[in-house]
Image: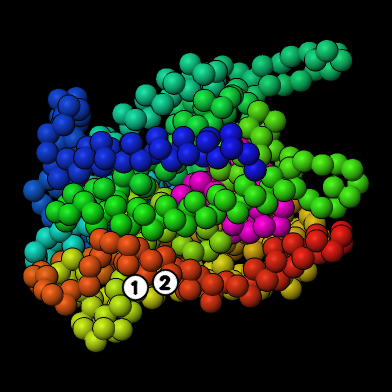
Amino acid sequence: MTLNGWLQILVFCGILIILVKPLGAYMTRVFSGERTFLSIIFGPLERGLYALAGTSEREEQHWTAYAFAMLMFNLAGLLLLYGLLRLQDVLPMNPAGLASPGPELSFNTAISFVANTNWQSYGGESTMSYFSQMVGLAVQNFVSAATGMAIAIGLIRAFSRASGKAIGNFWVDMTRATLYILLPICVVLTLVYVWLGVPQTFGAYVNATTLEGVQQTIAVGPVASQLAIKMLGTNGGGFFNANSAHPFENPDNISNMIQMLSIFAIGAAFTNVFGRMVGNQRQGWAILASMGILFIVGVGIVYWAEASGNPIMHAMGLSGGNMQGKEVRFGVVMSSLFAVITTAASCGAVNAMHGSFTALGGLIPLINMQLGEVIVGGVGAGFYGIVLFVIIAIFVAGLMVGRTPEYLGKKIEAKEMKMAVLAILCLPLAMLGFTAVASILPSAVASIGTAGPHGFSEILYAYTSAAANNGSAFGGLSANTPWFNITLGIGMLMGRFLVIVPALAIAGSLISKKTVPASAGTFPTDGPLFVGLLVGTILIVGGLTFLPSLALGPVVEHLAMIAGQVF
């Protein structure tokens, strides 16, 4: 590790913190229905969309109606995207003449993009037409991100309102998230990416002759627009198979920094939105501090592991850090930082191959995903993900001091605890359950690309990534098989909607409760003690749940590496 490397990490953290307050303030105005500088542009369109949907900004919904609207909208998106992919070969804007994906792959891909996971069992440039990329995948990148933001704002209202029955209007929240936040930022980002050299064209793939005289087809397309929303919406699907390691998706260190900031920006700003809407910004900073501690520790471990390299390689006279699977233009530090960011934020875009990291370097991305979307997380999803742990932490604190647990004046009782535990337990059910079956199923084991504990880690990483709605992978696993396409798709659905519905149920329960004034015995939730309690709760729950599986994979692999054993 070097001072220059840490300075680069600190620059990223500094810029991110600077963005939190202004972006949080703007998002608060948007979701509160206040007028913004974009209202003159999008106001008429917004009202027209409400008229088409048969609703209005003044109409609010009970949590059950909110959940039903969300589920039906996502079901419709799933069916439409599946149909579009199956008909790709007869639809327009397919200059490369690409065939339609098969039924299992279309099933997996449709679920993947609807669930904000963007797991890709295919090479983007060799499988998806321009029409599929833009009309199918990019549209879901917007609306799946907006869905997560809508759920988060509905939960925030449950804490910010003194009492009531409605948590907002799903159609209004999703529309505002798309029109006023995601779309305008993505327009700016697209122009910046084009300026930096990212392609944005409807032209056909380019044929070129190499210096050796070999004919090569260079894939291009509407890359910049897809790149902007895949990062900002923490979707992560790449136009190219190499994702953000491809020079057309990530040309240099400037684009790399912009992409990393895009991944974290909205998720971090949601903590400020929370603080503003509950009337105490310190509450939001406390949650962001908890996220930040887990993030910095993770970055430190991955950076140290990758900078230290592999002792087996050192014994062969090859000194230095582990550059296997990394782009020279990013090096160890930016590859390590990107890996932690993309798995902490449930994005899944990669600028290096995680399967080529050292054992401990690959361990942290796994842990980031297994803890749930709590370290910034996906847009919106990260906030409601960490609130589930806040509820558990507050309940534990209440038991320790013999008081009824309260958070921001709302009593945390049996119903909220049951829903929080249900949402948290669905993740290990999908991650570990499918991993256990796949580890003994011959057809699944045949997809492993590496022997030994790393092969087990490939399966564990795949199901962890799916259920955590992340989308990154240890590339050695050949996942484009009927078994993995179907089971990973089911895992994505479980990780997305079996968390969202309990979170909305918690919102519906809390919003009906009257706010209790703080007293001398109220546990403070805006200081270091609460931050420590929340971090400890997350680590204890995650450690007790996933340590045995991690011991079978990355931990054993690390011990074998120290002993000089290869597979």
Whole-percent x, y for residue 533 in the image: 37, 70
In which image quadrant can residue 436 be found?
A: bottom right
Amino acid at the residue labelled 2: Thr
Amino acid at the residue labelled 1: Ala
Whole-percent x, y for residue 318 in the image: 86, 41
What residue do we see at 74% from left, 14% from top? Answer: 208
Q: Nearer the viewer, residue 18 or 479?
A: 18
Q: Is residue 347 magenta?
A: yes
Q: Which residue is tagged 2?
A: 537
Where residue 393 is drawn, which disc sits there?
1
Helix, strand or loop at disc 1? helix
Q: Nearer the viewer, residue 51 or 227?
A: 227
What residue do we see at 82% from left, 42% from top? Answer: 319
Q: Is residue 243 visible?
A: no
389 left or right, relative to 272: right
Q: Are marks 2 and 1 in contact (CB under 8 Å)?
A: yes
Mark 2 and mark 1 lie on one chain; the one further toward the N terminus is 1
Q: Is residue 484 above or below residue 556?
A: above
What residue do we see at 65% from left, 28% from top? Answer: 329
Whole-percent x, y for residue 107 in the image: 54, 53
Helix, strand or loop at disc 2? helix
Q: Is residue 531 magenta?
A: no
Q: Is residue 116 visible?
A: yes
Q: Is residue 561 above or below residue 340?
A: below
Determine crowd level at label 1: few under 14, some 14-19, many 20+ residues with C-alpha closer than 10 A.
many
Q: Which residues are magenta?
A: 340-366
